[in-house]
């Protein structure tokens, strides 16, 4: 009952989100500003030296041997990014004077840049998330290999999910690394890397949730459980990168994968006698609330803090608690197995 209502809410929020996306770049005044900027390299008094490319007259499209060197492509990206930013700021000023609220441009709210960083608050928070995952993973590693006893044969850990959590740690750090890069600089490449890494992490953590909550320990059964999910996630990443970066569809996939794992952990926390199940409760409840922030976004406060940045902020304490649960789980399983062995 409860989760059906949640699904309905999520579905309606998705719909609202996709309808109101990118009204700004459809605005004819913004479009003409952008066209002018890309041909003259100036918005009003502001001129950008990146826009003085193609001095050799080589076309960007065409066969590879006719293309401009890579650095000129970078310049072109810089020029496009400067033009978009300055035209957006000009339009926003005009809109503000008319008493109109901010709108999105190319799927994003108008953010104020700091030191050439596009979304400075999200950059800092993504970096903090990366540090938290590194800290969590490192303390997990130290606990397992230096504090808890190891199996006498081949010095392996007693905990059966060690390898799976190592992969999780690596995927999480990879994802937050690309999130940091993407919020510094939003170009096609960084966007795809960020989205792909996030989908990979979310898909993998769903697989991990299935394997841990159903306590799947044999290699063959693990493969059987993971294979269909792995195939789906891989196809979805290929679809985003090489066919269509469909934000609405990607959001639906991510939200469904997120809800599925939160439900798995919640049900498991309800039936298990795990000593640290309260940590799961907190992570599931707060994680669910935080997901609403990601879905229901609002324009940046003072041009800096939007719902997405707040979402990155909430995951910092949750990451700490999450790795603390993982460590507890490793300790709990190890002690249980040792007791059994005696
Ligand atoms: Zn982000």
Image (cartoon, grey):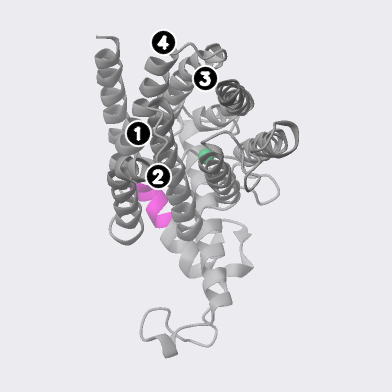
User: Which picture quadrant has residue 188?
Assistant: bottom left
Q: Is 241 placed above or below 59 here?
A: above
Q: Which residue is labeled 2 in the image?
A: 219
Q: Are marks 4 and 3 in contact (CB under 8 Å)?
A: no
Q: Which residue is labeled 3 in the image?
A: 283
Identity of the residue furthest to the right in this view: 146
Tell which of 221 and 288 is nearer to you.
Answer: 221
On screen, residue 220 versus residue 157, left or right, reads left
Callout 3: SS = helix
User: What range of the chain is rendered magenta?
Assistant: 25-33
Please state, as top left, top right, bottom left or bottom right, where the C terminus lies in the image: top right
Q: Are marks 4 and 1 in contact (CB under 8 Å)?
A: no
Distance from the alpha carbon under mark 2 to that under mark 1:
23 Å
Identity of the residue furthest to the front in this view: 342
The disc, 4 or 1, on the residue closer to the chain's N-terminal end is 1
Question: Looking at the picture, how far across and down is residue 237, in whole percent?
Answer: 35, 52
Q: Which residue is labeled 4 in the image?
A: 270
């Amino acid at each position: 009952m409860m989760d059906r209502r949640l699904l309905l809410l999520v579905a309606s929020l998705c719909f609202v989100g996709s309808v109101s996306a990118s009204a700004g770049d459809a605005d004819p005044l913004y479009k003409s500003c952008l066209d002018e900027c890309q041909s003259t390299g100036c918005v009003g008094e502001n001129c950008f030296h990146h826009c003085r490319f193609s001095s050799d007259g080589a076309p960007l499209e065409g066969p590879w041997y006719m293309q401009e060197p890579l650095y000129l492509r970078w310049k072109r990206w810089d020029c496009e990014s400067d033009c978009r930013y300055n035209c957006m700021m000009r339009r926003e000023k005009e809109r503000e004077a008319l008493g109109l609220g901010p709108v999105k441009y190319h799927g994003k709210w108008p953010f104020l840049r700091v030191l050439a960083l596009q979304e400075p608050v999200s950059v800092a928070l993504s970096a903090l998330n990366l540090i938290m995952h590194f800290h969590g993973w490192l303390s997990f590693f130290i606990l397992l290999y230096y504090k808890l006893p190891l199996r006498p044969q081949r010095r392996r850990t007693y905990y059966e999910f060690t390898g799976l959590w190592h992969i999780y740690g690596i995927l999480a750090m990879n994802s937050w690394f690309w999130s940091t890069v993407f919020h510094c600089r939003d170009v096609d490449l960084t966007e795809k890397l960020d989205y792909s890494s996030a989908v990979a992490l979310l898909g993998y953590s769903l697989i991990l949730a299935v394997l841990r909550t159903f306590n799947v320990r044999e290699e063959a059964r693990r493969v059987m459980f993971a294979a269909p999910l792995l195939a789906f996630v891989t196809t979805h990443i290929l679809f985003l990168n090489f066919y269509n970066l469909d934000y609405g569809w990607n959001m639906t996939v991510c939200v469904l994968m997120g809800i599925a794992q939160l439900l798995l952990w919640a049900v498991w926390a309800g039936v298990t006698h795990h000593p640290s199940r309260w940590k799961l409760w907190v992570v599931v409840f707060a994680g669910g609330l935080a997901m609403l922030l990601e879905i229901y976004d609002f324009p940046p406060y003072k041009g800096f803090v939007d719902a997405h940045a707040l979402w990155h902020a909430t995951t910092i304490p949750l990451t700490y608690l999450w790795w603390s649960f993982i460590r507890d789980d490793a300790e709990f399983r190890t002690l249980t197995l040792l007791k059994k062995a005696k």
